[in-house]
Amino acid sequence: MTVNKKAYLNIEEIVSIPSLSGITISADGKSIAFVRRTANWEENIYDHSICIYEQEKGESYRLPVSGTGCTAPSWSPDAKSIAYLRGDDDKNNQIFVQFIEDNREVQITNEVEGVNEFKWDAVGKGFYYLAQAKEPVKREALYEHFYEVAKEYRNNCLCYTTIDQKPQPNQLTDGQDFHIHEFALSNDGSKAVLIAAPTSKMEDYINRELYLLHLEERKVEKLPIDKMLGEGICFSPEGHKICYSASERRKDYYQNHIQDSTLEIYDFHNGEVTRPLSTLDAMPVPLYWTSKGILIRWQHRTNYCIGLLSKDGGVDTLSEEGFVLEASGTRDGEHLAYNKAVEGELFEIYWNDQKITNENSLFDGKFKSHREIISWKTSDDVEIEGVLSTPIAFDRNKAYPLLLIIHGGPNWASFPLFSDCFNGKYSIESFTEKGFIVLEPNYRGSSGYGNTFLKANYRTLGMANYDDVISGVDALIEKGIVDKARIGVMGWSNGGYISAFCSTFSNRFKAISVGGGITNWCTNYVHTDLPYFTSMYLGDNPWNDPEIYAQTSPMTYIKSASTPTLIQHGEKDARVPIANAYELYKGLREMGVETELIVFKDMAYSSDHPGVNATIMKQNLSWFSHYILGENL
C-alpha cells in the first residue's frame, strides 16, 4: 500500500520562505541584481545575499561576498561594478563596491552611525549618501519641567565621497536645520532634491518639506509646496522637473483628517505645479522618469500595478494582475525588472516580463491552501472584500471552524499571496492543516479600493471595523461553511486593535489573539511616536474630544469582555507602546477572563530573528487549537 507523505509547509518552513527585494537593473538592461533573504536558524538571524542575473547567460548566481548583511544593490553607470550596503554582525551599514571582473570588494564609507541610503554620481566616480551629521542641532525640549531645557539631535545630511575617498567624504548639508529622509539626483549630476523633516523624530514625519540642492554651490532652496508628502520622488530626464506624491490638500488639513495622495509635477523654470493624473483613484508612487514617461506603482483592489504615465496623463499599464513589490528600469524605458507574486504564489523576479527565478518550487511535493477573493455586504450596505483560505480537501457542504486574520495599517490590505511581508506572524498553512478556514477581511480604511473607502473609517474606528468583520463571518455562516460556535480572531498593530475591540465588545468569538494592538486610544496618543496618526483618524486630540477616544477604545467595553485572549507585544514597540498591552491584560484579568500576556524582549513592531517569528506563530496555533479545537495547551 502506498503512503501519502505529502504535507503542508510547517512553521519553520514558512518562516524560512526566501524573500526577494532590492531589485535593480543595469543601465544597459542586460544584468539584474537583487537581494535574497533566507533564515539562518543556527545563528537565529536572517541572511541577506546579493544575486546577479545576466541576460546573456540566462542564469543567476550569488555575488561572492563574505558577509551576510548585504542590501540595496546598485549598478555603476558602466555596469562593471555593483555597490551595496553591508552591515554584518550588528555593525552599521556601510557602502561597499564589488568589481565584477575580478571579484574585488572595497569598503567605501566608515560612518560611525552607518549609511541610510546612497546613489552613484552621474559618472560613476563616487556616491551621494545619507549619514548622521557631525554637528548636533539644539532644540527646546517638549517637557522642560521634566527634562533638560535643550536637547541635542543629529540630523541625516547628504554626503559625498569618491570611490578612492580622495578627498575625504564631505557633508553637503551639515548645519542645515532639517533631517533628510529621501533624495533624488538629476541625470546631469548638478542637482539633488531632498525630502526632509525638521528633526529625526517620527512625530515630525508629517512636516516633511521639499528642498532643491545645487550640488556644486551647495545652495539649498526650500520649494513652495505646502502639502503632506508621500513616498517616492524623481527628476525628469532633462532635470528641470520633479515628480513626487503629495496630498490633495494643504498640509495642515491632515492634522485632523486621513491622509490621501496623488502625483504632482513641479517645474523649476516657472514654479508651476501640475497634477498629471485625473482618473486614477489610488495613491500612486513615482518610481523613476524615463524618456517614455514616468514609471508609477499603484494599488487596485488586491493587485499592485506598474505602468508608464505619459505627458497627456494616460497610463500604459505594464503589469496588471498580481502584486508588483518593486521595479527598476533603464532611462530609455526599453528594459524593466520587477518582482511580482500572483494569486496563491510566492514572489518571483521578472526581466522584461520573463520570469527568471523559480522560488515557487518550494511547494513541490507539498499541500498548499487555496486562496480566493470573496465579498460581502455590511449592515449599512458597504461592500467588503476579503481573502478566504481553505484546506486542500475543502468541502462546501461542511461547517468548518473559522479564524479571522486582520491586517494592520489600516491603510494596507490582505492579499491572496504567500509572503511573510504581508503576514509574518500567523501561519495560514498551519491553520488550514488543522482544519480551519481563514478569512482576511479588507475592512473600511484598507488601501486599494479608492479614496472614499480609504477614509470610510474616519471617526468610526471600532464599531465600523467590527461590522465589517462580523458581517463577513455571518456571510460564511449563511453559506453553511462555518460553525458559528467555533470562531476566532487575531491581528497585529491595527489588526491587533480590531481584535482587541472584538475581545471586549463582543461575545461572538471563542478565542482571540491581540498582537501589538491599541487598546486605549488616549493611552496610545500619549505614548506613541506618531501621535498625529491618531488625530488623523479620530479628528482631534483626546483633550478636545474625549468622547470619540472613549467610544473607539476597546478598554471602554472591558466589563463585557468574556473571550479567552492571548496578548503578544514587542517590549520596545514605539508605534504601539506596550502600555496598551498591560492595560488590556490588567482589565481582562480583573474581569475574570482567561488571558495570557507574552512580551517579546527587545522586540519593536516586529522581529528580525526567525526563532522569534516561529515562536509567535506557534503560540497562536496553540492558543486557537486549544480554545477552539479542544487540544491541550
Image (cartoon, rainbow, N blue to C red):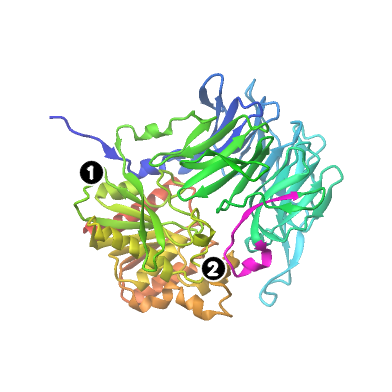
CA–CA distance in space, label 1 to label 2: 42 Å
| Amino acid under disc 2 | Tyr
- The residue at the far right in this view is 217
Q: Position of residue 63 (x, y in %)?
A: 56, 28
Q: Are marks 1 and 2 in contact (CB under 8 Å)?
A: no
Q: Position of residue 311 (x, y in %)?
A: 68, 42
Q: Position of residue 234 (x, y in %)?
A: 69, 44
Tell me the quarter of the picture where residue 385 sits: bottom left
- In this view, 53 is above or below 261: above
Mark 1 is surrounded, within 10 Å at the Cα level, by few (under 14), some (14 to 19) or many (20 or more) other residues, namely few
Residue pointed to by mark 1: 393
Residue appearing at x 55%, y 29% in the figure: 352
In depth, the one of 523 and 490 nearer the eye is 490
Q: Position of residue 459 (x, y in %)?
A: 51, 71
| Amino acid under disc 1 | Ala
Q: Which residues are magenta?
A: 249-266
Tell me the quarter of the picture where residue 10 sits: top left
In depth, the one of 537 and 577 nearer the eye is 537
- In this view, 484 is above or below 20: below
- Image quarter of the N terminus: top left
Residue pointed to by mark 2: 537
Q: Is residue 139 magenta?
A: no
Q: In the structure shown, which secondary structural element does the residue marked by tag 2 occupy?
A: helix
Q: Is residue 603 visible?
A: no
Tell me the tag on residue 616: none
- Image quarter of the C terminus: bottom left
